Amino acid sequence: MSLSATTAPPSNVTPSGFEPPRRRGHLLNRLDLKYSPYLYIAPFFLIFGIFGLYPMLRTAWMSLHDWDMIGDQTFIGLDNYAALIKDDYFWNALYNTFGIFALSTIPQLLLALFLANLLNSTLLRAKTFFRLAIFIPNVVSVAAVAIVFGMLFQREFGLINWLLSFVGVDNIDWDGQRWSSWTAIATMVNWRWVGYNTLILLAGMQAIPKDLYEAASIDGAGPWRQFWQITVPMVRPTLIFVIILSTIGGMQLFTEPLLFANGSILGGNQREFQTLAMYMYEKGIENLNTAGYGAAVAWAIFLIIALMSLLNFLLVRRSAK
Protein backbone atom coordinates (compact mmCIF):
# COMPACT_ATOMS: atom_id res chain seq x y z
CA MET A 1 0.00 0.00 0.00
CA SER A 2 1.42 3.39 -0.97
CA LEU A 3 1.11 6.68 0.81
CA SER A 4 -1.23 9.21 -0.58
CA ALA A 5 0.30 12.22 -2.25
CA THR A 6 -1.73 14.35 0.08
CA THR A 7 -0.38 12.68 3.22
CA ALA A 8 1.61 15.19 5.27
CA PRO A 9 5.15 14.23 6.38
CA PRO A 10 5.81 13.62 10.10
CA SER A 11 5.77 16.88 12.02
CA ASN A 12 8.92 18.12 13.89
CA VAL A 13 6.74 19.88 16.38
CA THR A 14 6.95 18.16 19.76
CA PRO A 15 4.27 18.20 22.41
CA SER A 16 4.49 20.92 25.00
CA GLY A 17 6.88 20.13 27.89
CA PHE A 18 8.78 17.46 25.96
CA GLU A 19 12.43 17.99 24.99
CA PRO A 20 14.14 15.68 22.51
CA PRO A 21 16.95 13.56 23.99
CA ARG A 22 19.44 15.12 21.59
CA ARG A 23 18.74 18.60 22.90
CA ARG A 24 18.98 17.46 26.52
CA GLY A 25 22.32 15.75 25.79
CA HIS A 26 23.63 18.94 24.18
CA LEU A 27 22.69 20.93 27.27
CA LEU A 28 24.41 18.43 29.57
CA ASN A 29 27.55 18.58 27.46
CA ARG A 30 27.63 22.36 27.70
CA LEU A 31 27.15 22.24 31.47
CA ASP A 32 29.89 19.61 31.76
CA LEU A 33 32.36 21.67 29.73
CA LYS A 34 31.55 24.80 31.70
CA TYR A 35 31.43 23.58 35.30
CA SER A 36 33.27 20.24 35.54
CA PRO A 37 36.77 21.85 35.55
CA TYR A 38 35.77 23.79 38.66
CA LEU A 39 34.64 20.57 40.32
CA TYR A 40 37.96 18.90 39.50
CA ILE A 41 40.05 21.65 41.11
CA ALA A 42 37.64 22.29 43.99
CA PRO A 43 39.29 19.70 46.35
CA PHE A 44 42.65 21.47 46.06
CA PHE A 45 41.20 24.88 46.90
CA LEU A 46 39.13 23.39 49.70
CA ILE A 47 42.17 21.75 51.30
CA PHE A 48 44.29 24.86 50.68
CA GLY A 49 41.64 27.06 52.28
CA ILE A 50 41.50 24.90 55.40
CA PHE A 51 45.18 24.10 55.86
CA GLY A 52 46.82 27.00 54.00
CA LEU A 53 44.81 30.19 53.67
CA TYR A 54 43.07 30.06 57.05
CA PRO A 55 46.30 29.47 59.04
CA MET A 56 47.94 32.36 57.14
CA LEU A 57 45.10 34.74 57.96
CA ARG A 58 44.96 33.48 61.53
CA THR A 59 48.71 34.02 61.93
CA ALA A 60 48.41 37.54 60.51
CA TRP A 61 45.69 38.29 63.07
CA MET A 62 47.80 36.83 65.88
CA SER A 63 50.78 38.96 64.87
CA LEU A 64 48.75 42.08 65.67
CA HIS A 65 48.16 40.94 69.26
CA ASP A 66 50.04 40.31 72.45
CA TRP A 67 48.95 36.70 72.17
CA ASP A 68 49.27 34.42 75.15
CA MET A 69 48.22 30.84 74.35
CA ILE A 70 47.11 30.27 77.93
CA GLY A 71 45.96 33.81 78.76
CA ASP A 72 44.55 36.98 77.25
CA GLN A 73 45.04 38.32 73.74
CA THR A 74 45.45 42.08 73.60
CA PHE A 75 45.39 44.00 70.31
CA ILE A 76 48.65 45.97 69.93
CA GLY A 77 48.69 46.75 66.20
CA LEU A 78 52.17 46.71 64.63
CA ASP A 79 54.08 46.71 67.92
CA ASN A 80 55.35 43.16 67.33
CA TYR A 81 56.83 44.20 63.99
CA ALA A 82 58.39 47.29 65.54
CA ALA A 83 59.97 45.11 68.22
CA LEU A 84 61.16 42.71 65.53
CA ILE A 85 63.19 45.42 63.83
CA LYS A 86 65.04 46.10 67.10
CA ASP A 87 65.50 42.44 67.99
CA ASP A 88 69.18 41.41 67.79
CA TYR A 89 68.26 37.72 67.92
CA PHE A 90 66.03 38.14 64.86
CA TRP A 91 68.82 39.79 62.87
CA ASN A 92 71.23 37.10 64.03
CA ALA A 93 68.83 34.40 62.80
CA LEU A 94 68.40 36.26 59.50
CA TYR A 95 72.18 36.51 59.09
CA ASN A 96 72.59 32.79 59.79
CA THR A 97 69.81 31.89 57.37
CA PHE A 98 71.33 33.90 54.53
CA GLY A 99 74.79 32.51 55.27
CA ILE A 100 73.68 28.87 55.17
CA PHE A 101 71.50 29.66 52.14
CA ALA A 102 74.47 31.06 50.20
CA LEU A 103 76.71 28.11 51.10
CA SER A 104 74.09 25.54 50.16
CA THR A 105 71.94 26.89 47.33
CA ILE A 106 74.57 28.32 44.98
CA PRO A 107 76.89 25.24 44.91
CA GLN A 108 73.82 22.99 44.91
CA LEU A 109 72.33 24.54 41.76
CA LEU A 110 75.64 24.62 39.92
CA LEU A 111 76.30 20.98 40.75
CA ALA A 112 72.73 20.00 39.84
CA LEU A 113 73.07 21.73 36.46
CA PHE A 114 76.34 19.93 35.76
CA LEU A 115 74.98 16.51 36.82
CA ALA A 116 71.78 16.97 34.83
CA ASN A 117 73.81 17.73 31.72
CA LEU A 118 75.95 14.67 32.40
CA LEU A 119 72.90 12.41 32.83
CA ASN A 120 71.44 13.84 29.62
CA SER A 121 74.56 12.96 27.63
CA THR A 122 74.22 10.34 24.92
CA LEU A 123 77.64 8.95 25.85
CA LEU A 124 76.56 7.88 29.35
CA ARG A 125 75.68 4.22 29.85
CA ALA A 126 73.29 2.81 32.50
CA LYS A 127 71.40 6.11 32.68
CA THR A 128 68.47 4.68 34.64
CA PHE A 129 70.78 3.37 37.36
CA PHE A 130 72.52 6.71 37.83
CA ARG A 131 69.24 8.65 37.76
CA LEU A 132 67.84 6.46 40.52
CA ALA A 133 71.07 6.56 42.51
CA ILE A 134 71.29 10.35 42.48
CA PHE A 135 67.78 10.63 43.94
CA ILE A 136 68.38 8.22 46.84
CA PRO A 137 69.63 10.92 49.30
CA ASN A 138 66.31 12.74 48.97
CA VAL A 139 64.28 9.74 50.12
CA VAL A 140 66.53 8.95 53.08
CA SER A 141 65.11 10.06 56.43
CA VAL A 142 66.42 13.46 57.46
CA ALA A 143 67.00 12.09 60.96
CA ALA A 144 69.27 9.39 59.56
CA VAL A 145 71.09 11.99 57.47
CA ALA A 146 71.63 14.15 60.55
CA ILE A 147 72.98 11.22 62.57
CA VAL A 148 75.44 10.24 59.84
CA PHE A 149 76.66 13.77 59.23
CA GLY A 150 76.84 14.41 62.97
CA MET A 151 79.27 11.51 63.21
CA LEU A 152 81.23 12.74 60.19
CA PHE A 153 81.65 16.19 61.71
CA GLN A 154 82.48 15.11 65.27
CA ARG A 155 85.35 17.01 66.84
CA GLU A 156 87.43 14.14 68.19
CA PHE A 157 86.56 11.08 66.12
CA GLY A 158 84.86 12.49 63.04
CA LEU A 159 85.92 11.37 59.57
CA ILE A 160 86.21 14.94 58.27
CA ASN A 161 88.67 16.00 60.99
CA TRP A 162 90.62 12.77 60.47
CA LEU A 163 91.00 13.54 56.76
CA LEU A 164 91.94 17.16 57.47
CA SER A 165 94.63 15.99 59.87
CA PHE A 166 96.60 14.58 56.91
CA VAL A 167 97.06 18.12 55.57
CA GLY A 168 98.02 19.55 58.94
CA VAL A 169 94.64 20.98 60.01
CA ASP A 170 93.85 20.73 63.72
CA ASN A 171 90.54 19.31 64.91
CA ILE A 172 87.67 21.68 64.15
CA ASP A 173 84.76 22.12 66.55
CA TRP A 174 82.16 22.09 63.78
CA ASP A 175 79.18 23.05 65.93
CA GLY A 176 81.09 25.55 68.06
CA GLN A 177 81.81 28.23 65.45
CA ARG A 178 79.66 30.10 63.00
CA TRP A 179 81.53 29.41 59.76
CA SER A 180 82.16 25.74 60.54
CA SER A 181 78.55 25.03 61.54
CA TRP A 182 77.32 26.79 58.41
CA THR A 183 79.62 24.61 56.30
CA ALA A 184 78.50 21.39 57.97
CA ILE A 185 74.79 22.20 57.65
CA ALA A 186 75.19 23.38 54.05
CA THR A 187 76.98 20.13 53.21
CA MET A 188 74.07 18.18 54.67
CA VAL A 189 71.53 20.22 52.71
CA ASN A 190 73.48 19.89 49.47
CA TRP A 191 73.77 16.14 49.84
CA ARG A 192 70.01 15.78 50.36
CA TRP A 193 68.70 18.10 47.66
CA VAL A 194 71.18 18.15 44.78
CA GLY A 195 69.66 14.97 43.31
CA TYR A 196 66.15 16.37 43.48
CA ASN A 197 67.13 19.52 41.59
CA THR A 198 69.18 17.46 39.14
CA LEU A 199 66.15 15.44 38.06
CA ILE A 200 64.01 18.55 37.59
CA LEU A 201 66.69 20.14 35.40
CA LEU A 202 67.15 16.85 33.57
CA ALA A 203 63.44 16.83 32.69
CA GLY A 204 63.83 20.33 31.26
CA MET A 205 66.87 19.28 29.22
CA GLN A 206 65.10 16.28 27.73
CA ALA A 207 62.47 18.63 26.29
CA ILE A 208 65.13 20.38 24.18
CA PRO A 209 64.91 19.27 20.51
CA LYS A 210 67.83 17.04 19.55
CA ASP A 211 67.99 18.74 16.17
CA LEU A 212 69.57 21.78 17.79
CA TYR A 213 72.51 19.73 19.06
CA GLU A 214 72.92 17.98 15.72
CA ALA A 215 72.98 21.30 13.87
CA ALA A 216 75.47 22.70 16.37
CA SER A 217 77.72 19.67 15.94
CA ILE A 218 77.65 20.09 12.17
CA ASP A 219 78.65 23.75 12.63
CA GLY A 220 81.62 22.64 14.71
CA ALA A 221 80.38 23.52 18.21
CA GLY A 222 81.88 21.33 20.93
CA PRO A 223 80.06 19.96 24.01
CA TRP A 224 81.05 22.89 26.21
CA ARG A 225 79.81 25.49 23.73
CA GLN A 226 76.60 23.52 23.16
CA PHE A 227 76.02 23.51 26.90
CA TRP A 228 76.27 27.29 27.24
CA GLN A 229 74.74 28.26 23.90
CA ILE A 230 71.89 25.73 23.74
CA THR A 231 71.29 23.88 27.01
CA VAL A 232 71.43 26.74 29.48
CA PRO A 233 69.25 29.18 27.46
CA MET A 234 66.67 26.49 26.65
CA VAL A 235 66.47 25.23 30.23
CA ARG A 236 66.20 28.72 31.73
CA PRO A 237 62.45 28.47 32.65
CA THR A 238 63.13 25.25 34.54
CA LEU A 239 66.16 26.84 36.18
CA ILE A 240 64.01 29.75 37.38
CA PHE A 241 61.58 27.25 38.90
CA VAL A 242 64.41 25.40 40.66
CA ILE A 243 65.92 28.65 41.97
CA ILE A 244 62.59 29.77 43.42
CA LEU A 245 62.02 26.37 45.05
CA SER A 246 65.54 26.43 46.52
CA THR A 247 65.00 29.96 47.80
CA ILE A 248 61.78 28.96 49.56
CA GLY A 249 63.44 25.90 51.08
CA GLY A 250 66.58 27.79 52.08
CA MET A 251 64.65 30.53 53.88
CA GLN A 252 62.60 27.90 55.77
CA LEU A 253 65.58 25.78 56.81
CA PHE A 254 64.72 24.11 60.11
CA THR A 255 65.20 20.35 60.39
CA GLU A 256 68.87 20.06 59.44
CA PRO A 257 70.23 22.72 61.84
CA LEU A 258 67.90 21.53 64.60
CA LEU A 259 69.16 17.96 64.39
CA PHE A 260 72.75 19.16 63.98
CA ALA A 261 72.29 20.99 67.30
CA ASN A 262 71.02 17.77 68.92
CA GLY A 263 67.53 19.19 69.27
CA SER A 264 68.51 22.57 70.70
CA ILE A 265 66.24 25.25 69.24
CA LEU A 266 68.89 27.90 70.03
CA GLY A 267 71.23 26.61 67.32
CA GLY A 268 74.43 26.42 69.35
CA ASN A 269 75.53 27.91 72.65
CA GLN A 270 75.80 31.39 71.13
CA ARG A 271 73.08 30.93 68.50
CA GLU A 272 75.78 30.42 65.89
CA PHE A 273 73.45 28.69 63.43
CA GLN A 274 69.92 29.44 64.62
CA THR A 275 67.80 30.07 61.51
CA LEU A 276 64.65 32.18 61.13
CA ALA A 277 62.44 29.10 61.24
CA MET A 278 64.09 27.98 64.49
CA TYR A 279 63.65 31.45 65.99
CA MET A 280 60.00 31.45 64.96
CA TYR A 281 59.53 28.08 66.69
CA GLU A 282 61.28 29.37 69.81
CA LYS A 283 59.00 32.41 70.08
CA GLY A 284 55.75 30.99 68.74
CA ILE A 285 55.68 27.39 69.96
CA GLU A 286 58.20 26.88 72.74
CA ASN A 287 57.26 30.11 74.55
CA LEU A 288 53.47 30.09 74.70
CA ASN A 289 53.26 33.63 76.06
CA THR A 290 54.93 35.14 72.96
CA ALA A 291 52.83 33.45 70.26
CA GLY A 292 51.92 36.82 68.74
CA TYR A 293 55.58 37.72 68.37
CA GLY A 294 56.26 34.31 66.82
CA ALA A 295 53.46 34.98 64.31
CA ALA A 296 55.18 38.26 63.40
CA VAL A 297 58.40 36.34 62.77
CA ALA A 298 56.47 33.93 60.54
CA TRP A 299 55.10 36.77 58.44
CA ALA A 300 58.55 38.33 58.24
CA ILE A 301 59.82 35.03 56.80
CA PHE A 302 56.95 35.04 54.30
CA LEU A 303 57.77 38.57 53.12
CA ILE A 304 61.49 37.78 52.85
CA ILE A 305 60.75 34.67 50.76
CA ALA A 306 58.44 36.66 48.47
CA LEU A 307 61.05 39.39 47.95
CA MET A 308 63.87 36.89 47.40
CA SER A 309 61.82 34.88 44.91
CA LEU A 310 60.87 38.03 43.00
CA LEU A 311 64.49 39.20 42.97
CA ASN A 312 65.73 35.84 41.68
CA PHE A 313 63.07 35.83 38.98
CA LEU A 314 63.97 39.33 37.82
CA LEU A 315 67.70 38.63 37.81
CA VAL A 316 67.39 35.40 35.82
CA ARG A 317 64.88 36.97 33.45
CA ARG A 318 67.12 39.97 32.89
CA SER A 319 70.12 37.76 32.18
CA ALA A 320 68.13 36.11 29.39
CA LYS A 321 67.88 39.38 27.45
Image (cartoon, rainbow, N blue to C red):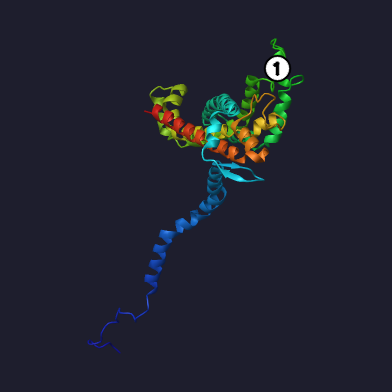
Q: Position of residue 254 (x, y in %)?
A: 63, 34
Local secondary structure at mark 1: loop
Residue 229 makes an appearance in the image:
yes
Quadrant holding the C terminus:
top left
Q: Position of residue 212 (x, y in %)?
A: 40, 31
The answer to which of 84 and 157 lies nearer the viewer is 84
Residue at the extreme left of the image, as rendered: 6
Residue at image coords 69%, 15%: 164
Q: Position of residue 181 (x, y in %)?
A: 65, 23
Residue 213 makes an appearance in the image:
no
- Location of residue 107 by image quarter: top right
Q: Position of residue 282 (x, y in %)?
A: 65, 35
Residue at image coords 52%, 40%: 77
The answer to which of 178 and 158 lies nearer the viewer is 178
- Location of residue 179 by image quarter: top right
Mark 1 is surrounded, within 10 Å at the Cα level, by few (under 14), some (14 to 19) or many (20 or more) other residues, namely some
- Location of residue 209 by image quarter: top left
Up-down relation of residue 6 to residue 293 (above or below): below
Residue at the extreme right of the image, as rendered: 157
Tag count in the figure? Answer: 1
The answer to which of 183 and 297 lies nearer the viewer is 297
Quadrant holding the N terminus:
bottom left
Amino acid, disc 1: Ile
Tell me: 21 left or right of 296: left
Residue position for label 1: 172
Residue at the extreme top of the image, as rendered: 168
Up-down relation of residue 285 to residue 218 (above or below): below
Up-down relation of residue 220 to residue 47 (above or below): above
The answer to which of 197 and 63 lies nearer the viewer is 63
Residue at image coords 58%, 40%: 295
